Image (tube, rainbow, N blue to C red):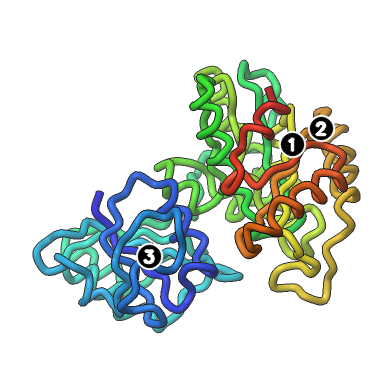
Amino acid sequence: MNVAILAHEKFPDGAKTATGILRYGDQDVRAVLDHANAGERVSDLRSGLGDAPVVEGIDDVPGIDAGGIDALIIGIAPVGGGFDESWRSDVRGALERGCDVVSGLHYFLAEDEGFAALATENDCELIDVRRPHDDLTVSGGTASEVDSHVVLTVGTDCSVGKLTVSYELVGAAREAGIDAAVIPTGQTGIMIEGWGNPIDRVVSDFTAGAVEEMIAEKGNEYDLLVVEGQGSITHPAYSAVTCGILHGAMADSLVLCHAAGRERIHGYEDWEVAPIPTYVSLYEELAAPVHESEVVAGALNTSHLPESEAETAVETYGEALGVPASDPVRFGAEAILEEIV
C-alpha cells in the first residue's frame, strides 16, 4: 500500500507512529508531511528509516493527483490523543482525492461529521485503529497455557522504545531460526501488523482480557511471542494500562526498557524516574501473584548519545539491573535474545 504520513512539526523525535511505520512497516511511504522540515528527506533527519521526501502538505505529495497514494496515516500520537485542527486541511485534501485516512488518535475521525461526509462522497474509509472491537471481556487467566514462550517489554517510562525493542527482538529471533511474532497493543503496532487490540482505549475491566485474547489467538502458532508494552508501572497517568498488560500477558520473561539519561517522567517532569533496580522488583513482585515472571535482560535507548558514549551507557545500565543489556538498534538484540531462550 502506498501511503503518506502526517507528522507536522514532530518528525522525527516526536512522531513515534511515523518512525515506527517507516522502520518496521511494509507500507510504501511516498512522503512525510511536516511543515518544519519541508524540503528535507527522511534519511537526512534519521538514519535507519528508509527514505522519502518531507513535504509541506498533502498537495505536495508526489503523485497525489494521479492516484499514487492509497492512504494518509496520522503519524503523531500526542499526549491525550487529541486531533490538532491544523491537520484538518491535509485530512480533507486526502479524502477529497479518494484516499483512506488511518488514525491512531483517541479522537475518532469517523465521528467527525465533516470527515465522514467527505469519506462517503469520495468512496474512501476513515480507519480509527484505536477503536476496540465490541466482544472484549475479562481475563480468564489462561495466557500461560499457550505453547509459546511469552516475553513482555516493560519500561521505566513511556517513550523509551518498547515497540522498537519488541520488533528488534522478533527480528533477531527470526534470524536465529525461531518462529516469533509481535503482539501489538498500541496504535503503531496495530498499523504495522494490521491487527491488534488498542489497550489504552479498552475498558479497564477488559484490559487484561484484551491482551489474553491476542496471546490465545497466536500462542500456538509461534515459538516466541513478544508483547509490546505500554507506559510504566510508575507513570502517574498510564500505570493502569501497564498493569493490565502485565497481568493479561502472564509473561515468562520481561525485558526492561529505559532511555539513557532519562531522569524525569516524559511529559510529567515533576515526577522523577525511580532508581533502575527499583523497577526490577516492582515488575516482578506485581506480576508474581498472577504469574511468576523475571526481568531477564535490559534494553537501553542510546539514540541521543554519540557512539563513543553509548557502549559505556549500556554497560552501566546492565550493571544496575544485574542482567545483560544492549541497545538493540545500535548493538543488536542477540544478547537479550540469548537470555530469553
Q: Let me know if residue 118 appears in the view.
A: no
- Disc sitting over residue 294 in the figure: 2
- In depth, the one of 166 and 246 nearer the eye is 166
**In whole angstroms, how far apart are the C-alphas of marks 2 and 1?**
6 Å
Question: Label 2 sits on what residue type?
Answer: Glu
Q: Position of residue 18 (x, y in %)?
A: 44, 61
Q: Residues within 10 Å of mark 3 (few under 14, many from 20)?
A: many
Q: Let me know if residue 291 appears in the view.
A: yes
- In depth, the one of 256 and 282 nearer the eye is 256
In the picture of the structure, the residue carrying the numbered disc 3 is 42
**In whole angstroms, how far apart are the C-alphas of marks 3 and 2?**
38 Å
Which image quadrant for residue 152? top right
Which image quadrant for residue 168? top right
Q: Nearer the viewer, mark 3 or mark 1?
A: 3
Q: Position of residue 224 (x, y in %)?
A: 59, 25
Q: Residue at x 34, y 74 (%)?
A: 40
Judged from this view, the residue extending furthest toward the left is 66
- In depth, the one of 73 and 326 nearer the eye is 326
Question: Label 1 sits on what residue type?
Answer: Leu
As drawn, is 316 to the left or to the right of 128? right
Say whether marks 3 and 1 touch (CB < 8 Å).
no
- In depth, the one of 237 and 170 nearer the eye is 170
Say whether marks 2 and 1 touch (CB < 8 Å).
yes
Q: Residues within 10 Å of mark 2 (few under 14, many from 20)?
A: some
- Ranked by sequence position, the earlier of labels 3 and 2 is 3
